[in-house]
Image (cartoon, rainbow, N blue to C red):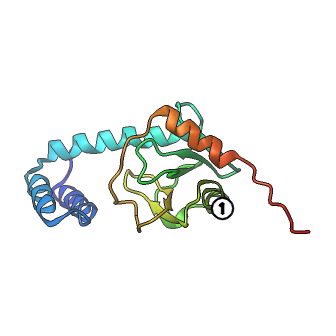
């Protein structure tokens, strides 16, 4: 597959849109890198993205090691291994969806259910639900908000398997509220 000049130009435009959240100095550096990319480099990047899409399919089919925290007829939910905040969940539709506006209702219903558990069981003040189609497949991110506002472009950190399992246990805990007498 050889990219046409128009396709290369469009890809570069999309990449520039994805770096708008960066601090000015880093954004300038990233823009220089984008401008210097050859058609061959852009093609290699597309092939890499195709591999990322396959990861979403493997997650949806439970063929890949992930910490699963929810599922319904339309989606599966996993803890993000590089979370923005404690309890960051990625919801992957079971059937591939390319555009965020095409995400089925069931996927959002799973998001609502898990958002309640995050606020109740993890003590988050709120949960930010954001759709993303950055790797060519639409997913939902549930980002717990504890003290400061965050979004899908906020810095990430790595989590150990032990941390993720502990968060999973907390999310899955059933809380029983005592009614006043």
Looking at the image, residue 179 lies above or below residue 138: below
Looking at the image, residue 21 lies above or below residue 86: below
Element at badge 1? Answer: helix
Image quarter where the C terminus lies is: bottom right
Query: Left of 50 or right of it: where is 110?
Result: right
- Percent of width and height locating residue 58: 52, 36
- Number of numbered tags placed on the structure image: 1
Query: Left of 26 or right of it: where is 89?
Result: right
Q: Nearer the viewer, residue 166 or 150?
A: 166
In percent of the image, x 40 and y 64: which residue is there?
A: 151
- Percent of width and height locating residue 165: 57, 36
Can residue 1 be seen in this snapshot?
no
Quadrant of residue 159 within the rendered picture: top left
- Percent of width and height locating residue 98: 46, 56
Q: Nearer the viewer, residue 34 or 176?
A: 176
Looking at the image, residue 36 lies above or below residue 178: above
Looking at the image, residue 74 lies above or below residue 9: above
Question: Outermost residue toward the front?
Answer: 181
In percent of the image, x 23 and y 43: which residue is there?
A: 43
Question: Outermost residue toward the right?
Answer: 181
Q: Nearer the viewer, residue 10 or 118?
A: 118
In percent of the image, x 55 and y 67: which residue is there?
A: 126
Image quarter where the N terminus lies is: top left
**Disc 1 marks which residue?**
116
């Amino acid at each position: 597959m050889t990219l046409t000049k128009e396709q290369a130009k469009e890809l570069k435009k999309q990449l520039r849109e994805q770096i708008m959240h960066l601090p000015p100095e880093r954004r300038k550096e990233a823009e220089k890198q984008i401008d210097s990319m050859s058609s061959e480099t852009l093609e290699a990047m597309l092939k890499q993205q195709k591999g990322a899409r396959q990861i979403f399919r493997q997650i949806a089919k439970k063929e890949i090691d992930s910490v699963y925290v929810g599922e319904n007829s339309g989606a599966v939910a996993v803890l993000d291994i590089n979370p923005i905040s404690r309890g960051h969940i990625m919801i992957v539709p079971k059937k591939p969806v390319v555009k965020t506006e095409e995400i089925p209702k069931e996927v959002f219903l799973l998001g609502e259910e898990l958002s309640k558990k995050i606020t109740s069981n993890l003590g988050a003040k709120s949960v930010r639900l954001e759709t993303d189609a950055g790797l060519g497949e639409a997913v939902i991110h549930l980002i717990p908000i504890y003290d400061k506002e965050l979004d899908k472009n906020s810095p990430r950190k790595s989590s150990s398997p032990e941390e993720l399992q502990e968060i999973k246990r907390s999310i899955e805990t059933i809380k029983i509220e005592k009614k006043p007498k």
